[in-house]
Image (cartoon, helix red, strand yellow):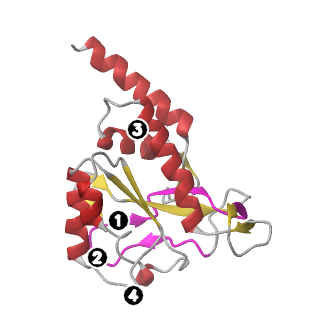
Amino acid sequence: CFNWLLEQPRVDLIVNSWSQPTSNCNDELLYSLRVLWLANSIPVFAAGNFGLDDSKSRDPVNFTLFDDIPLLSVGALGKDEKPLPQSSTGNNVCGNHVNTPTIMAPGENLLVASPLNPVSYQARSGTSYAVTYAATALAILVDKFPNASHKEIIEALTNTSKNMEKNKRAIRVNINRAIQRLKQHQIVDSQNQ
């Protein structure tokens, strides 16, 4: 699958709603994700629905792409703006000090298309649905700021998001703040030229 993505002329985002079946630290997958990043694609993953348990950290959400670039993993928020109990959170077991998820997005009772429902829609909850919210925010930023690097876009999204908990592990997507940060960055860049 990753080979096919690399052959395409332009793939800005790769949205993934899967994880490994067991907890491990498989570097083979990390190398593939790094190649995708170097090909100018942003991989973003659902954090998983295993709850708060560090020992259940799953590849690839427990990776960091490079020392200063996290792999974006998305946790699910409930209607009350608190993390869903089943949304995977915690430190990972790979020893690289990555907290998962990187960011949080709405993920409770979202109306989604479903071929299994007679009216074609059903309410679903979890990180696989929250990841689409975060990916949409990333797509807006990539489109609105074509000259910004993907690293700048990720920093704008993760560093301007609203802290949800005192431990600052869970942060909520805030697209408006990310846009403001990137606009300010553009102004500074234009003044330095």
Nearer to us of marks 2 and 4 is 4
Position of residue 139 relative to residue 1, above or below, is above
Nearer to us of marks 3 and 1 is 3
Along the line of sight, the residue nearer the viewer: 65 or 166: 65
Q: CA distance from mark 3 to mark 1?
A: 24 Å
Q: Residue at x 52, y 47 (%)?
A: 136
Amino acid at circle 2: Cys
Say which mark, if any, is on residue 22. Answer: 4
Say which mark, if any, is on residue 98. Answer: 1
Q: Is residue 188 visible?
A: yes
Which quadrant of the view contains residue 65?
bottom left
Which badge, 4 or 3, comes first in the chain's sequence? 4
Position of residue 27 relative to residue 7, above or below, is below
Percent x, y for residue 171? Answer: 52, 53
Which quadrant of the view contains residue 23?
bottom left
Nearer to us of marks 3 and 2 is 3
Main SS of the magenta part reads: loop
121 left or right, relative to 46? right
In the picture, the quarter occupied by the C terminus is: top left
Disc 3 marks which residue?
A: 142
In the picture, the quarter occupied by the N terminus is: bottom left
Q: CA distance from mark 2 to mark 1?
A: 8 Å
Amino acid at circle 4: Thr
**Mark 2–mark 1 contact, CB under 8 Å?**
yes
Which badge, 3 or 1, comes first in the chain's sequence? 1
Which quadrant of the view contains residue 181?
top left
